[in-house]
Amino acid sequence: MMTKMMKSRSLSQVVVLGAAAFGLLVTGCSGPECVDRFDCQINKGSPGAGKQFVCEANVCVARDIVPETPGTGSDAGTDAGTDPGTDAGTDAGTEPTACADLSHDAQLGTLQLQPGFTVVESALLAENIGAITAVAGASGSYTVYGVNSDKSVYALGTWPNVAGSTTPLFPVVEPNGPQNAFPSNYLVSDGVRLLAGYTLADASGKVAVHDTVTNASTYLAAKGNFSAVGLDGAFLINGLDLEGVSETGSAVYALKTQSTPFSVSRLATFPVAQSASGFNALTTNKIVVLGYFGGKNVLHAVSPETYAPALAAGTSLDLSGANTPQIYAGSDLFYAAGFGAGVALHRGAYSESYEQLTHDVARISLSPAGSDGKGVTAGNLEVVLSQSNTCTSVVAMAPLAEDLLVGLEDKNGRRLVRLHAGTP
Protein backbone atom coordinates (compact mmCIF):
# COMPACT_ATOMS: atom_id res chain seq x y z
CA MET A 1 0.00 0.00 0.00
CA MET A 2 1.33 3.43 -0.88
CA THR A 3 1.50 5.88 1.98
CA LYS A 4 1.47 9.66 2.05
CA MET A 5 4.89 11.25 1.54
CA MET A 6 6.34 13.72 4.02
CA LYS A 7 6.60 16.68 1.67
CA SER A 8 9.43 18.44 3.47
CA ARG A 9 12.77 19.61 2.21
CA SER A 10 14.32 16.40 0.86
CA LEU A 11 16.62 14.98 3.51
CA SER A 12 19.11 14.07 0.82
CA GLN A 13 19.61 17.77 0.20
CA VAL A 14 21.26 18.11 3.57
CA VAL A 15 24.33 16.39 2.09
CA VAL A 16 25.11 19.61 0.31
CA LEU A 17 25.55 21.30 3.68
CA GLY A 18 27.88 18.62 4.99
CA ALA A 19 27.32 15.25 6.61
CA ALA A 20 27.19 16.74 10.09
CA ALA A 21 23.87 18.40 9.31
CA PHE A 22 22.17 15.00 9.13
CA GLY A 23 22.43 14.68 12.88
CA LEU A 24 20.12 17.65 13.33
CA LEU A 25 17.41 15.86 11.40
CA VAL A 26 17.49 12.49 13.04
CA THR A 27 17.81 13.22 16.75
CA GLY A 28 14.66 12.54 18.68
CA CYS A 29 13.22 14.11 21.82
CA SER A 30 10.73 13.28 24.54
CA GLY A 31 8.28 15.42 26.47
CA PRO A 32 6.56 18.35 24.70
CA GLU A 33 5.91 17.99 20.97
CA CYS A 34 7.90 21.13 20.29
CA VAL A 35 9.80 24.01 21.81
CA ASP A 36 10.03 26.05 18.62
CA ARG A 37 9.08 25.78 14.92
CA PHE A 38 12.30 23.94 14.10
CA ASP A 39 11.22 20.99 16.26
CA CYS A 40 8.03 20.81 14.20
CA GLN A 41 9.95 20.80 10.92
CA ILE A 42 12.27 18.04 12.15
CA ASN A 43 9.64 15.81 13.73
CA LYS A 44 6.59 16.41 11.52
CA GLY A 45 8.05 17.36 8.16
CA SER A 46 6.06 19.65 5.91
CA PRO A 47 2.46 20.70 6.50
CA GLY A 48 2.00 21.15 2.75
CA ALA A 49 2.37 23.89 0.20
CA GLY A 50 1.48 27.38 1.36
CA LYS A 51 1.70 26.47 5.05
CA GLN A 52 4.32 26.34 7.77
CA PHE A 53 4.44 24.91 11.29
CA VAL A 54 4.52 27.12 14.36
CA CYS A 55 4.92 25.90 17.95
CA GLU A 56 2.02 27.01 20.09
CA ALA A 57 1.78 25.79 23.71
CA ASN A 58 4.30 23.04 22.86
CA VAL A 59 2.07 21.76 20.04
CA CYS A 60 2.88 21.97 16.31
CA VAL A 61 0.17 23.93 14.47
CA ALA A 62 0.04 24.47 10.69
CA ARG A 63 -0.52 28.07 9.63
CA ASP A 64 -0.82 29.71 6.21
CA ILE A 65 2.36 31.30 4.83
CA VAL A 66 1.33 34.83 4.00
CA PRO A 67 3.26 35.86 0.87
CA GLU A 68 4.95 39.21 0.67
CA THR A 69 3.48 40.97 -2.36
CA PRO A 70 5.36 44.06 -3.53
CA GLY A 71 3.51 47.21 -2.55
CA THR A 72 1.02 45.44 -0.28
CA GLY A 73 3.07 44.73 2.80
CA SER A 74 1.57 45.40 6.21
CA ASP A 75 4.03 48.27 6.84
CA ALA A 76 3.67 51.10 4.36
CA GLY A 77 6.78 52.85 5.64
CA THR A 78 4.88 55.84 7.12
CA ASP A 79 2.52 55.68 10.06
CA ALA A 80 -1.02 56.98 9.42
CA GLY A 81 -1.44 58.67 12.80
CA THR A 82 -2.06 62.43 13.01
CA ASP A 83 0.24 62.90 15.99
CA PRO A 84 3.89 62.39 14.96
CA GLY A 85 4.71 61.10 18.40
CA THR A 86 1.64 58.92 18.88
CA ASP A 87 0.70 55.72 17.06
CA ALA A 88 -2.80 56.08 15.67
CA GLY A 89 -3.24 52.32 15.78
CA THR A 90 -3.92 51.89 12.06
CA ASP A 91 -1.15 51.19 9.56
CA ALA A 92 -1.38 52.75 6.10
CA GLY A 93 -0.65 49.47 4.33
CA THR A 94 -3.06 46.66 3.43
CA GLU A 95 -2.85 43.11 4.67
CA PRO A 96 -1.31 40.71 2.13
CA THR A 97 -3.57 38.02 0.73
CA ALA A 98 -3.18 34.48 2.06
CA CYS A 99 -2.42 31.73 -0.45
CA ALA A 100 -5.82 30.12 0.10
CA ASP A 101 -7.51 33.32 -1.11
CA LEU A 102 -5.40 33.86 -4.24
CA SER A 103 -6.51 32.77 -7.70
CA HIS A 104 -4.69 29.64 -8.92
CA ASP A 105 -4.40 28.45 -12.52
CA ALA A 106 -5.52 24.83 -12.87
CA GLN A 107 -2.10 23.78 -14.22
CA LEU A 108 0.47 26.33 -13.05
CA GLY A 109 -1.11 27.60 -9.83
CA THR A 110 0.34 31.01 -9.03
CA LEU A 111 3.35 30.48 -11.29
CA GLN A 112 3.43 32.56 -14.46
CA LEU A 113 4.66 31.11 -17.76
CA GLN A 114 7.17 33.39 -19.43
CA PRO A 115 7.44 34.19 -23.18
CA GLY A 116 9.24 31.57 -25.25
CA PHE A 117 7.79 28.59 -23.39
CA THR A 118 4.53 26.67 -23.63
CA VAL A 119 2.50 24.25 -21.53
CA VAL A 120 1.91 21.02 -23.47
CA GLU A 121 -0.22 18.99 -21.09
CA SER A 122 -0.53 17.94 -17.45
CA ALA A 123 -1.43 14.96 -15.26
CA LEU A 124 -2.12 14.32 -11.59
CA LEU A 125 0.82 13.48 -9.33
CA ALA A 126 0.21 11.26 -6.31
CA GLU A 127 0.81 12.73 -2.85
CA ASN A 128 3.33 10.04 -1.97
CA ILE A 129 5.70 10.44 -4.92
CA GLY A 130 9.02 12.29 -4.68
CA ALA A 131 11.72 12.02 -7.34
CA ILE A 132 10.55 11.02 -10.84
CA THR A 133 12.02 10.00 -14.19
CA ALA A 134 10.59 9.42 -17.68
CA VAL A 135 12.07 6.58 -19.74
CA ALA A 136 11.63 6.32 -23.51
CA GLY A 137 9.77 3.27 -24.82
CA ALA A 138 8.29 2.04 -28.08
CA SER A 139 6.66 4.40 -30.61
CA GLY A 140 7.66 7.57 -28.82
CA SER A 141 6.03 6.62 -25.53
CA TYR A 142 7.50 7.44 -22.12
CA THR A 143 7.04 5.47 -18.92
CA VAL A 144 7.10 7.57 -15.77
CA TYR A 145 8.62 6.11 -12.59
CA GLY A 146 8.63 7.60 -9.11
CA VAL A 147 10.14 7.09 -5.67
CA ASN A 148 7.39 6.50 -3.14
CA SER A 149 7.38 7.44 0.54
CA ASP A 150 7.68 3.74 1.42
CA LYS A 151 11.24 3.91 -0.02
CA SER A 152 10.36 1.89 -3.11
CA VAL A 153 10.23 2.76 -6.81
CA TYR A 154 6.95 2.40 -8.68
CA ALA A 155 5.98 2.48 -12.35
CA LEU A 156 3.39 5.27 -12.57
CA GLY A 157 2.20 4.65 -16.11
CA THR A 158 2.77 5.87 -19.66
CA TRP A 159 2.72 9.64 -20.01
CA PRO A 160 0.27 11.33 -19.75
CA ASN A 161 -1.74 8.45 -18.27
CA VAL A 162 0.00 8.64 -14.89
CA ALA A 163 -1.54 6.83 -11.92
CA GLY A 164 -0.25 5.49 -8.63
CA SER A 165 0.66 1.80 -8.79
CA THR A 166 0.16 -0.41 -5.75
CA THR A 167 2.98 -2.81 -6.68
CA PRO A 168 6.55 -1.68 -6.00
CA LEU A 169 9.10 -2.28 -8.73
CA PHE A 170 12.09 -2.46 -6.37
CA PRO A 171 13.10 -1.15 -2.93
CA VAL A 172 15.57 1.73 -2.75
CA VAL A 173 16.98 0.15 0.42
CA GLU A 174 18.27 -3.39 0.05
CA PRO A 175 16.30 -6.21 1.74
CA ASN A 176 17.10 -6.31 5.47
CA GLY A 177 18.84 -2.97 5.06
CA PRO A 178 18.70 -0.05 7.50
CA GLN A 179 15.28 1.26 8.44
CA ASN A 180 16.50 4.79 9.14
CA ALA A 181 17.61 5.49 5.57
CA PHE A 182 16.88 8.75 3.74
CA PRO A 183 16.08 8.20 0.04
CA SER A 184 18.17 10.55 -2.12
CA ASN A 185 16.29 13.08 -4.19
CA TYR A 186 16.84 11.54 -7.62
CA LEU A 187 15.68 8.73 -9.90
CA VAL A 188 17.45 8.28 -13.25
CA SER A 189 17.76 5.79 -16.10
CA ASP A 190 20.43 4.61 -18.53
CA GLY A 191 17.70 3.47 -20.92
CA VAL A 192 17.43 -0.04 -19.48
CA ARG A 193 18.19 0.30 -15.78
CA LEU A 194 16.95 2.63 -13.06
CA LEU A 195 19.18 4.12 -10.38
CA ALA A 196 18.05 5.35 -6.97
CA GLY A 197 19.94 5.78 -3.72
CA TYR A 198 19.82 6.44 -0.01
CA THR A 199 22.03 7.80 2.75
CA LEU A 200 22.18 7.49 6.53
CA ALA A 201 22.82 10.11 9.20
CA ASP A 202 26.60 9.61 8.89
CA ALA A 203 26.37 10.14 5.07
CA SER A 204 27.07 6.47 4.32
CA GLY A 205 24.65 4.89 1.89
CA LYS A 206 24.08 2.81 -1.21
CA VAL A 207 22.74 3.09 -4.73
CA ALA A 208 20.29 0.59 -6.18
CA VAL A 209 20.61 -0.38 -9.85
CA HIS A 210 17.47 -2.09 -11.15
CA ASP A 211 17.33 -3.85 -14.52
CA THR A 212 13.84 -3.35 -15.95
CA VAL A 213 14.31 -6.31 -18.32
CA THR A 214 15.53 -8.97 -15.87
CA ASN A 215 13.85 -7.37 -12.83
CA ALA A 216 17.09 -7.83 -10.86
CA SER A 217 18.55 -5.24 -8.50
CA THR A 218 22.17 -4.62 -7.51
CA TYR A 219 23.23 -2.50 -4.53
CA LEU A 220 26.58 -0.75 -4.25
CA ALA A 221 27.98 1.29 -1.39
CA ALA A 222 28.01 4.99 -2.32
CA LYS A 223 28.64 7.44 0.49
CA GLY A 224 26.84 10.76 0.21
CA ASN A 225 25.14 9.98 -3.12
CA PHE A 226 23.44 13.36 -3.49
CA SER A 227 22.43 13.38 -7.15
CA ALA A 228 22.91 11.35 -10.31
CA VAL A 229 22.30 11.36 -14.03
CA GLY A 230 21.90 8.50 -16.51
CA LEU A 231 23.67 8.16 -19.86
CA ASP A 232 23.43 5.36 -22.39
CA GLY A 233 25.13 2.51 -20.54
CA ALA A 234 26.33 4.51 -17.54
CA PHE A 235 25.36 6.51 -14.46
CA LEU A 236 27.23 9.51 -13.10
CA ILE A 237 26.87 9.78 -9.32
CA ASN A 238 27.67 12.95 -7.43
CA GLY A 239 28.86 11.86 -4.00
CA LEU A 240 31.72 11.06 -1.66
CA ASP A 241 32.76 7.59 -2.85
CA LEU A 242 31.62 4.56 -4.82
CA GLU A 243 32.23 0.90 -4.10
CA GLY A 244 35.20 -0.36 -6.13
CA VAL A 245 36.84 3.06 -6.63
CA SER A 246 40.02 3.53 -4.59
CA GLU A 247 39.85 7.34 -4.64
CA THR A 248 37.38 9.02 -2.31
CA GLY A 249 36.14 12.52 -1.63
CA SER A 250 33.57 14.84 -3.15
CA ALA A 251 33.53 14.06 -6.87
CA VAL A 252 31.49 12.62 -9.74
CA TYR A 253 31.80 8.82 -9.91
CA ALA A 254 31.00 6.75 -13.00
CA LEU A 255 29.14 3.44 -12.90
CA LYS A 256 29.28 1.74 -16.31
CA THR A 257 26.51 -0.80 -16.88
CA GLN A 258 27.21 -2.25 -20.35
CA SER A 259 28.53 -5.48 -18.81
CA THR A 260 28.48 -7.29 -15.48
CA PRO A 261 30.03 -6.92 -13.09
CA PHE A 262 29.72 -3.18 -13.49
CA SER A 263 32.89 -1.14 -13.89
CA VAL A 264 33.46 2.01 -11.86
CA SER A 265 35.78 5.02 -11.85
CA ARG A 266 36.06 8.60 -10.61
CA LEU A 267 35.07 10.72 -13.60
CA ALA A 268 35.46 14.31 -12.38
CA THR A 269 36.90 16.30 -9.49
CA PHE A 270 35.90 19.80 -8.45
CA PRO A 271 37.93 23.03 -8.54
CA VAL A 272 37.30 23.70 -4.83
CA ALA A 273 39.10 21.42 -2.38
CA GLN A 274 36.59 21.69 0.48
CA SER A 275 33.47 21.07 -1.56
CA ALA A 276 30.32 19.05 -0.98
CA SER A 277 28.13 17.16 -3.41
CA GLY A 278 26.02 19.08 -5.93
CA PHE A 279 23.63 18.56 -8.82
CA ASN A 280 23.95 16.61 -12.08
CA ALA A 281 21.88 16.91 -15.26
CA LEU A 282 21.95 15.79 -18.91
CA THR A 283 20.80 17.72 -21.99
CA THR A 284 19.39 16.20 -25.17
CA ASN A 285 22.64 17.08 -26.99
CA LYS A 286 24.48 14.93 -24.42
CA ILE A 287 26.16 17.74 -22.52
CA VAL A 288 26.40 16.86 -18.82
CA VAL A 289 26.04 19.42 -16.07
CA LEU A 290 28.11 18.56 -13.00
CA GLY A 291 27.93 20.55 -9.78
CA TYR A 292 29.30 21.00 -6.30
CA PHE A 293 28.66 23.10 -3.23
CA GLY A 294 31.39 25.41 -2.00
CA GLY A 295 29.52 28.17 -0.20
CA LYS A 296 27.24 28.33 -3.24
CA ASN A 297 25.89 25.73 -5.63
CA VAL A 298 28.15 25.81 -8.69
CA LEU A 299 27.42 24.12 -12.03
CA HIS A 300 29.90 23.25 -14.82
CA ALA A 301 29.00 22.03 -18.31
CA VAL A 302 30.98 19.28 -20.06
CA SER A 303 30.70 18.29 -23.73
CA PRO A 304 30.51 14.60 -24.70
CA GLU A 305 33.71 15.12 -26.70
CA THR A 306 35.42 15.87 -23.38
CA TYR A 307 33.84 13.40 -20.95
CA ALA A 308 33.30 10.38 -23.25
CA PRO A 309 37.04 9.54 -23.63
CA ALA A 310 37.55 9.82 -19.86
CA LEU A 311 34.49 7.68 -19.21
CA ALA A 312 35.71 4.99 -21.60
CA ALA A 313 39.27 5.00 -20.24
CA GLY A 314 38.31 5.21 -16.58
CA THR A 315 40.30 8.43 -16.11
CA SER A 316 39.34 11.60 -14.28
CA LEU A 317 38.56 15.12 -15.48
CA ASP A 318 39.42 18.34 -13.65
CA LEU A 319 36.44 20.69 -13.90
CA SER A 320 38.70 23.73 -13.61
CA GLY A 321 39.74 23.32 -17.26
CA ALA A 322 38.82 25.72 -20.07
CA ASN A 323 36.59 23.11 -21.75
CA THR A 324 34.40 22.71 -18.65
CA PRO A 325 33.04 26.23 -18.07
CA GLN A 326 31.16 27.31 -14.99
CA ILE A 327 27.62 28.15 -16.10
CA TYR A 328 25.94 29.00 -12.80
CA ALA A 329 26.73 29.84 -9.17
CA GLY A 330 24.16 30.79 -6.57
CA SER A 331 22.84 30.10 -3.10
CA ASP A 332 19.28 29.86 -4.43
CA LEU A 333 19.47 26.54 -6.29
CA PHE A 334 17.20 23.69 -5.21
CA TYR A 335 17.51 21.29 -8.17
CA ALA A 336 18.72 20.95 -11.75
CA ALA A 337 17.37 18.83 -14.63
CA GLY A 338 17.87 18.57 -18.36
CA PHE A 339 15.45 20.62 -20.46
CA GLY A 340 16.01 19.98 -24.15
CA ALA A 341 19.42 21.32 -25.21
CA GLY A 342 19.77 23.07 -21.89
CA VAL A 343 19.43 22.77 -18.13
CA ALA A 344 16.47 23.80 -15.97
CA LEU A 345 17.11 25.31 -12.54
CA HIS A 346 14.61 25.32 -9.68
CA ARG A 347 15.46 28.37 -7.58
CA GLY A 348 14.14 29.91 -4.40
CA ALA A 349 14.83 30.43 -0.72
CA TYR A 350 14.14 28.70 2.58
CA SER A 351 11.53 29.90 5.02
CA GLU A 352 12.30 30.27 8.70
CA SER A 353 11.04 26.70 9.12
CA TYR A 354 13.26 25.45 6.29
CA GLU A 355 10.46 25.00 3.78
CA GLN A 356 11.54 25.36 0.17
CA LEU A 357 9.86 28.49 -1.21
CA THR A 358 9.87 28.47 -5.01
CA HIS A 359 10.78 31.74 -6.71
CA ASP A 360 11.17 30.50 -10.27
CA VAL A 361 12.27 27.87 -12.73
CA ALA A 362 14.91 29.11 -15.18
CA ARG A 363 16.75 27.60 -18.14
CA ILE A 364 20.25 27.93 -19.62
CA SER A 365 20.75 26.66 -23.17
CA LEU A 366 23.96 24.70 -23.79
CA SER A 367 25.75 23.73 -27.01
CA PRO A 368 29.13 22.21 -27.92
CA ALA A 369 31.79 24.80 -28.83
CA GLY A 370 35.10 24.87 -30.67
CA SER A 371 36.21 23.18 -33.87
CA ASP A 372 36.69 19.93 -31.92
CA GLY A 373 33.42 20.24 -30.01
CA LYS A 374 35.21 19.86 -26.67
CA GLY A 375 34.05 23.15 -25.21
CA VAL A 376 30.59 24.36 -24.25
CA THR A 377 28.77 27.62 -24.98
CA ALA A 378 26.14 28.66 -22.47
CA GLY A 379 23.26 30.95 -23.36
CA ASN A 380 21.72 33.59 -21.14
CA LEU A 381 19.61 32.51 -18.21
CA GLU A 382 15.92 32.61 -19.20
CA VAL A 383 13.11 32.49 -16.68
CA VAL A 384 10.53 29.81 -17.55
CA LEU A 385 8.14 30.08 -14.60
CA SER A 386 8.00 32.83 -11.99
CA GLN A 387 5.75 34.06 -9.20
CA SER A 388 5.51 37.10 -6.96
CA ASN A 389 4.45 34.96 -3.99
CA THR A 390 5.40 31.49 -2.79
CA CYS A 391 1.99 29.79 -2.96
CA THR A 392 2.85 27.15 -5.59
CA SER A 393 5.84 24.90 -4.97
CA VAL A 394 7.97 22.93 -7.41
CA VAL A 395 8.31 19.44 -5.93
CA ALA A 396 9.96 17.53 -8.80
CA MET A 397 11.63 18.03 -12.19
CA ALA A 398 12.67 15.56 -14.87
CA PRO A 399 13.34 15.66 -18.61
CA LEU A 400 10.92 14.07 -21.06
CA ALA A 401 12.25 14.04 -24.63
CA GLU A 402 12.93 17.72 -25.49
CA ASP A 403 10.59 18.86 -22.74
CA LEU A 404 10.55 19.25 -18.96
CA LEU A 405 8.19 17.62 -16.49
CA VAL A 406 7.62 19.89 -13.49
CA GLY A 407 5.86 18.60 -10.39
CA LEU A 408 3.78 21.35 -8.77
CA GLU A 409 1.91 21.52 -5.47
CA ASP A 410 -0.43 24.09 -3.96
CA LYS A 411 -3.93 24.44 -2.56
CA ASN A 412 -5.31 22.58 -5.60
CA GLY A 413 -3.16 19.49 -5.02
CA ARG A 414 -0.25 18.03 -6.97
CA ARG A 415 0.25 17.57 -10.71
CA LEU A 416 2.91 17.09 -13.36
CA VAL A 417 3.08 19.75 -16.04
CA ARG A 418 4.94 19.24 -19.32
CA LEU A 419 6.73 22.37 -20.53
CA HIS A 420 8.25 23.00 -23.96
CA ALA A 421 10.82 25.58 -25.03
CA GLY A 422 9.21 27.35 -27.99
CA THR A 423 6.06 26.23 -29.80
CA PRO A 424 5.48 22.44 -29.84
Image (cartoon, rainbow, N blue to C red):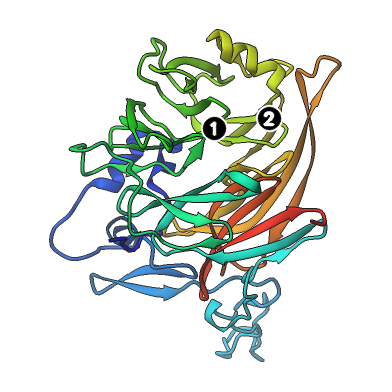
Q: What is the number of callouts on the image?
A: 2
Disc 1 marks a residue whose amino acid type is: Gly
Q: Quadrant of residue 308?
A: top right
> Which residue is labeled 1 in the image?
230
Residue 155 in the image: x percent, y percent?
43, 51
Q: Secondary structure at mark 1?
A: strand
Up/down of 212 relative to 346, above or below = above
Residue 248 in the image: x percent, y percent?
40, 16
Q: Closer to the N terminus: mark 2 or mark 1? A: 1
- Who's the residue at 69% across and 16% down the image? 306
Decide: few, some or many residues near mark 1? Use Cα within 10 Å; few <14, some 14-19, many ≥20.
Answer: many
Whether residue 320 is visible: no
Q: Residue furthest right?
A: 371
Report the quarter where the N terminus lies.
bottom left
Q: Is residue 84 left or right of residue 98?
A: right
Q: Quadrant of residue 93?
A: bottom right
Up/down of 112 relative to 365, above or below = below
Residue 290 in the image: x percent, y percent?
59, 29
Up/down of 81 relative to 327, above or below = below
Disc 2 marks a residue whose amino acid type is: Lys
Using the image, tell me which numbered label, if any, was put on residue 286: 2
Residue 302 in the image: x percent, y percent?
68, 24
Between 168 and 70, the one nearer to me in the picture: 168
- Who's the residue at 52% across and 27% down the image? 236
